[in-house]
Amino acid sequence: MSKEISQTGALTVPKFLAKKKSGEKISMITAYDFTMAKLFDEAGVDSILIGDSLGMVIQGRENTLGVSLDQMIYHCHCVAMGAKRAHLIGDMPFMSYQASKEDAVRSAGKLLKKGKVHGVKMEGGEEIAEIVAAVVKVGIPVMGHVGLMPQHVQQMGGYKVQGREEKAAKKILNDAKAIANAGAYSLVLEGIPLELAQKITDTIDIPTIGIGSGPHCDGQVLVCYDLLGMYSEFKPKFVKHFGNLGVAIHAAMKDYIREVKEGTYPDEDHSFKER
Ligand code: KIV
């Protein structure tokens, strides 16, 4: 059996919800492993999302569709080992919940039991509202995700801003209401115009978490490698590099390689002696 993880001190669902009422913005970041989770948790981030974006940034795939439930459980558990107080959300991977309520309840249950997260996230609008309600009914907190939904990449024909036309904006607003009414405790708004994100945020009672959806959401989430300047495959307009770790890692590796080649590392200071 794996080491029990203490959940004491974690930011709970009611406290998460209370932030919308008090007007305190929610900070959220993705993480996929122990070391990053510990660093982010110690820095004071409110919430960590173990996103299926790991399919791209960890596994190097071109989209998130190939990520399995077992892989999500593994990464959720790694993060839970490192985070002591942040609110942890595990992404439900593609086809672990869409086919039936039973699939959804079982998959969500596994993420909570084995992955040690506090809630799960599902992509979809009105069409998955009953599935969301079924998972909430068994006591599992659900975060929704509408707008640009990466698991719908084939249908969208790429990662494009959603809801620019009136009809599409109305659909996203209805989707948001349907997911909130189904009992979700929070909702990710990805890749929609800032005006629509503001309207949704003002309309629903649960906190909205924006990514590429402007400043009016109740909180923000970014993929950690984007924020840290480590993912160079492409940089969407909304991404801000708060650090330049890609460059720092490159420079450190260059120094290491040079010192190994010239024999200056390891020196005596970095070696053990008999006595
Ligand atoms: O998988 C992920 O990291 C996400 C965020 C981008 C919201 O869903």
Image (tube, grey):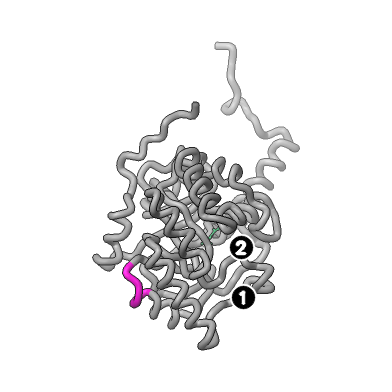
Taking the magenta stretch, the answer to whether it contains residue 144 is no
Tell me the quarter of the picture where residue 244 sits: bottom right
Q: Which label was assigned to residue 151?
A: 2
Magenta extent: 201-205
For the question of whether residue 64 can be seen, the reply is: yes
N-term mark: 2 or 1: 2
* Helix, strand or loop for disc 2: helix
Q: Give, as a three-letter code, the residue at label 1.
A: Lys
Image quadrant occupied by the C terminus: top right
In x, y percent, where is residue 11?
A: 33, 50
Q: Amino acid at mark 2?
A: Gln
Residue at point 37% right, 49% down? 139
**2 or 1: mark nearer the eye:** 2
At horizontal 66% and vertical 41% (from top left) the residue drawn is 256
Residue 178 percent coordinates (x, y) = 43, 70
Q: Secondary structure at mark 1?
A: loop
Tag shown at residue 160:
1
Queried whether the magenta region covers residue 204, the answer comes back as yes
Q: Residue at x 66, y 71 (%)?
A: 155
Residue plotted at (54% across, 87% down): 165
Picture layout, residue 45 above or below residue 208: above
- Of residues 192 and 259, the one nearer the viewer is 192
